[in-house]
Image: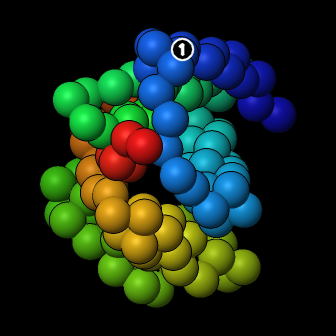
Amino acid sequence: HTDLAVELQDLSNGAESYLDAAAIQETLKNLLNNAADAIADSDNRGCGAITLRLETRMRWLSIQVQDNGKGMSEEECARVFEPFYTTKSSTTNWGIGLSYCYNVIYYHGGQMQVKSAPGVGTTFELFLPCA
C-alpha cells in the first residue's frame, strides 16, 4: 500500500491551449499512473508525492508531472519515449504509454521532455502552444 500526496499548482495565469481533451486526459492519466508506480517501487512508499504544475513560458503552456519515485538513469531517460521500451518488470506492461504520450503532444504542435535521477524522482514536462 502506498500513500500519495498529490498537489496541483496552477501558475498559468489563465493561459489557454487548443487541445484534444480525450487525448490530453489519457496522456495525463498515463503520466500520473507512471508516477504512482515509480513511487510504489521506491524507498518513498508511504510518503510519495506527485505535483502537477501548470505555468506559462513565453507562448507555451507548460504542464509538469513530478514525482519522488525511484527515478531513472540517463540511459533510461534517453530511451523512455521509444515504442515498446519499458523500465517496468510487469508482463502486463507493453512499453507503449510514454511513446503514445510523446506522439499526442507532438501532434498538438508541442514538445515533451523528461528529467530524472535515480533515487530522487522524475519530472515529465509537456509544452503546448498557447491559444
Which quarter of the figure has residue 124? Answer: top left
Seen in the picture, residue 40 relative to 111 is either above or below; the reply is: above
* Residue at x 37% of width, y 35% of height: 62
In the image, 80: left or right of 99? left
Which quarter of the rendering shows the N terminus? top right
Residue 46: quadrant of the picture: top right
Residue 26 showing in the rendered view = no
Picture colour scheme: rainbow
Mark 1 crowdedness (10 Å alpha carbons): few <14, some 14-19, many ≥20: few
Disc 1 secondary structure class: strand
Q: Is residue 54 above or below residue 98?
A: above
Q: Position of residue 80 (x, y in %)?
A: 34, 67
Marker count (numbered)? 1
Q: Residue furthest right?
A: 1
Looking at the image, which is closer to me, 98 or 8? 8
- Residue depicted at 44% across the width and 36% down the height: 63
- Give the side of residue 62 with respect to residue 13, left or right: left
Residue 100, position as x, y percentages in the image: 51, 75
Query: Taking the image as drawn, is residue 4 in sight?
Result: yes
The residue tagged 1 is: 9
Q: Position of residue 119 (x, y in %)?
A: 35, 33
State left or right for residue 115 relative to residue 46: left
- The C terminus: image quadrant: top left
Q: Residue at x 69, y 17 (%)?
A: 5
Q: Nearer the viewer, residue 21 or 31?
A: 21
- The kind of residue tagged 1 is Gln
Q: Please name the residue shown 46% across and 27% down the image.
A: 15
